């Protein structure tokens, strides 16, 4: 019997725009998530998922950036599954969860420490393995993520998830962060 496929999904935290980021790239949260994804993919013989449709004005897309960094970290293109969809965390996680179900795959999710509570909430009831990484966050995202620890469960419980995602997608499709 064939082994169950494994997908390792580092929940995107954009390196762009670089404004507001500090410290060496190797210490930043988004990079640490990718590094952990490579480590876990190597240990489990899994494939790394890159799921993001975001592109900030004047920068390469998150998907292109992630692919370049993953290649530097040693992941061959054949070991990646790239889906250039999703602008918001919940949307990207839903794509990953559905893909894992469709392929009957084990899903390993990696999030930053500030993203962890929201990712945990979104993935509740799902059969996933969730890892957390520590790294330097963008200051603005630090406060946004802190707010979302409390706001997102309220948004979802109030039945406003689609309205929220639509609002985020409108901003991000316009190139705004």
Image: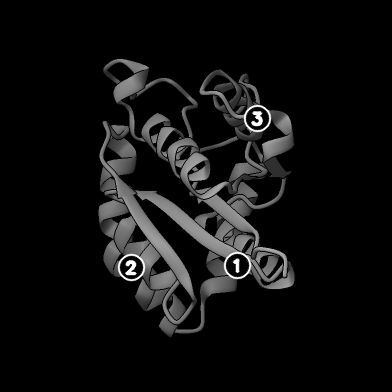
Q: Assess whether mark 2 and mark 1 are in contact (beta carbons under 8 angstroms).
A: no
Residue 61 got which mark? 3
Q: Which residue is mark 1?
A: 97
Q: Where residue 62 appears, x then y in whole percent? A: 60, 33
Give the labeled residue for mark 2: 151
Distance (Cα) linking label 1 and label 2? 22 Å
- Estimate the spatial distance between the alpha carbons at disc 3 and disc 2, rounded to whole Å: 27 Å
Residue 77, x across and y down, in percent: 71, 30
Mark 1 is surrounded, within 10 Å at the Cα level, by few (under 14), some (14 to 19) or many (20 or more) other residues, namely many
Among numbered discs 1 and 2, the one appearing first in the sequence: 1
Q: Is residue 20 left or right of residue 68?
A: left
User: Which residue occupies 54% across, 62% down?
Assistant: 107
| Residue at the image point whose x is 54% and y is 50% from the top | 8
- Closer to us: mark 1 or mark 2? 1
Say whether residue 129 is left or right of residue 172.
left
**Is 150 drawn above or below residue 112 in the view shown?**
below
Query: Which of the two labelled residues, at mark 3 and mark 1, occupies the earlier sequence position?
Result: 3
Gap between marks 3 and 1 measured at Cα: 22 Å
Q: How is the image coloured?
A: one colour
| Residue at 65 percent of width and 23 percent of height | 60
In the image, taking residue 3 as reference, residue 38 lies left or right, namely left
């Amino acid at each position: 019997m064939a082994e169950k496929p494994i997908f390792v999904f580092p929940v995107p935290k954009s390196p762009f725009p670089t404004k507001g980021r500090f410290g060496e790239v190797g210490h930043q949260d988004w990079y640490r998530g990718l590094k952990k994804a490579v480590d876990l993919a190597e240990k489990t013989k899994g494939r790394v998922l890159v799921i993001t449709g975001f592109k900030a004005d004047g920068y390469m897309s998150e998907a292109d950036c992630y692919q370049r960094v993953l290649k530097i970290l040693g992941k061959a293109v054949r070991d990646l599954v790239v889906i250039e969809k999703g602008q918001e965390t919940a949307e990207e996680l839903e794509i990953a969860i559905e893909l894992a179900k469709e392929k009957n795959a084990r899903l390993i999710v990696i999030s930053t420490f500030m993203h962890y509570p929201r990712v945990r909430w979104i993935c509740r009831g799902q059969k996933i393995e969730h890892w957390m990484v520590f790294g330097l966050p963008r200051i603005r995202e630090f406060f946004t993520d802190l707010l979302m620890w409390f706001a997102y469960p309220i948004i979802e419980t109030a039945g406003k998830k689609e309205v929220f995602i639509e609002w985020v997608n409108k901003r991000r499709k316009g190139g705004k962060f």
